[in-house]
Amino acid sequence: MRVLFVVNVDWFFISHRLPIALKLKELGYDVHIACKFTEHKECLEEVGFVIHPIEFSRSRSNPLDELRILLSVRRLFRNLNPDIVHAITIKPVLYSGIAARFIKKTPKFVFAISGLGYVFASKTVRATATRKFISVFYKIAFSKKQKTVIFQNSVDDAILSAITSLEDNEKVLIKGSGADLTSYSYSLEPKGNEIRVVMAARLLKEKGVFEFIEASRLVANQTSRVKFILAGPLDPDNPHGIDGSDVSEWVNQGIIDYIGPRDDIPQVFANSHIVVLPSYYGEGLPKVLIEAAACGRPIVTTDNPGCRDAIIDGKTGLLVPIRDSEALAQAITKLATDSELRQTMGLEARKLAEQEFDVNSVVAKHIEIYDRLMADKHVDNG
């Protein structure tokens, strides 16, 4: 059985879908990966995956370049003839579904909606126009009969189901990509007078970076005990990426410590007291919040689709309005000044992770989807 994963870039595949691919390999599937490759290419080949470079761009690009990428996807489908295509993130989902309209024998599809992105979260005139345009492509992409669409939250489900007339038997809700509960293990918060507040995310405006910085300033006016730590990569290819010079200035002013992209997030969280994600991005269900819960850390996040689905407000963390630095600062201060509340919420967060976010459960649900699709003998040739 041949499964082709189509995703924007290799590091996202490794962080969000690698356990599924490894399980498929263990079960004897022929696993292929198509994406833009970086330094992780050889690592994926060594595991035994067959790789197919496709230069997906995550920034605004020339329409002719996007057409070339679409044709590359179609050519790959024709040459490889996969049984199942598992497309992940916006462009791979849209391009895979559209490309399948132009080949004779089409595979069965798993479309993973990892959030709808900035276009569906923003209310600007430009975003509204782009949203209408993209909605047409979602209709085309989801027009194939043999498919399962995986949503990570109910809001994304409602939006795309209304746009594309998805039936209940064509979709499933899986809360995030899961966390390895052995790697992300529970630990008591560190001792000492300093309270460490961590935000770990790609450095995008819509992830709430500026709100995090402003909250840091507000909290610093009340106490010097709270240290703010920003972790995560710069994203220069994204038009909404934070400029590195801004980060350097914040560090020089003593507002935050910036520790950059990290491959030891479990340890980063173990050394923290509170995890924050003030996002107003079109999230699916942020993996970082699942991981924070697994480590037993209370969370402060926004009442934003996906973010609010990762916590139980008042029990495992606190919700604040989007783009509200003052409310964010107040929530952080509340947790920073109440050790008992932090530890109680941390324990409840770990329980929630064990109940809903175990990566082994997420992998098993995906295998069930593949088995169900392959058991369906219906032929769909467009």
Image (cartoon, rainbow, N blue to C red):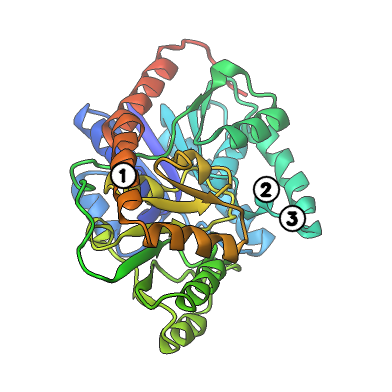
Q: Is residue 273 above or below residue 309?
A: below
| Figure label count | 3
Instruction: Tell me residue 246's x, y (percent).
Output: 51, 82
Q: Is residue 42 above or below residue 84?
A: below
Which quadrant of the rendered structure holds the C terminus?
Answer: top right
Q: Residue at 47% x, 83% y: name it.
A: 250
Q: Is residue 358 visible?
A: no
The answer to which image quadrant residue 64 occupies is bottom right
Please identify the residue farthest to the bottom as the structure is shown.
252
Q: Earlier in the sequence, mark 2 or mark 3?
A: 2
Q: Residue at 55% x, 45% y: name it.
A: 115
Judge the density around disc 2: few (<14), some (14-19), many (≥20) Cα neighbours within 10 Å.
many
Q: Earlier in the sequence, mark 1 or mark 3?
A: 3
Spatial CA distance of label 1 from label 3 is 41 Å
Which quadrant of the rendered structure holds the N terminus?
Answer: top left
The answer to which image quadrant residue 281 occupies is bottom right
Amino acid type of disc 1? Thr
Instruction: Tell me residue 65's x, y (percent).
Output: 61, 60
Amino acid type of disc 3? Ala
Instruction: Tell me residue 90's x, y (percent).
Output: 56, 46
Horizontal side, residue 111 vs residue 126: left or right: left
Asked if labels 3 and 2 touch by Cβ distance under 8 angstroms, the answer is yes
Viewer-closest of 37 and 170: 170
Q: Nearer the viewer, mark 2 or mark 1?
A: 1
Amino acid type of disc 2? Phe
Secondary element type, mark 2: helix
Q: Which mark is residue 127?
A: 3
Q: Identify residue for label 1.
A: 344
Spatial CA distance of label 2 from label 1 is 35 Å
Instruction: Tell me residue 51's x, y (percent).
Output: 33, 49
Horizontal side, residue 353 vs residue 27: left or right: right
Q: Which mark is residue 120?
A: 2
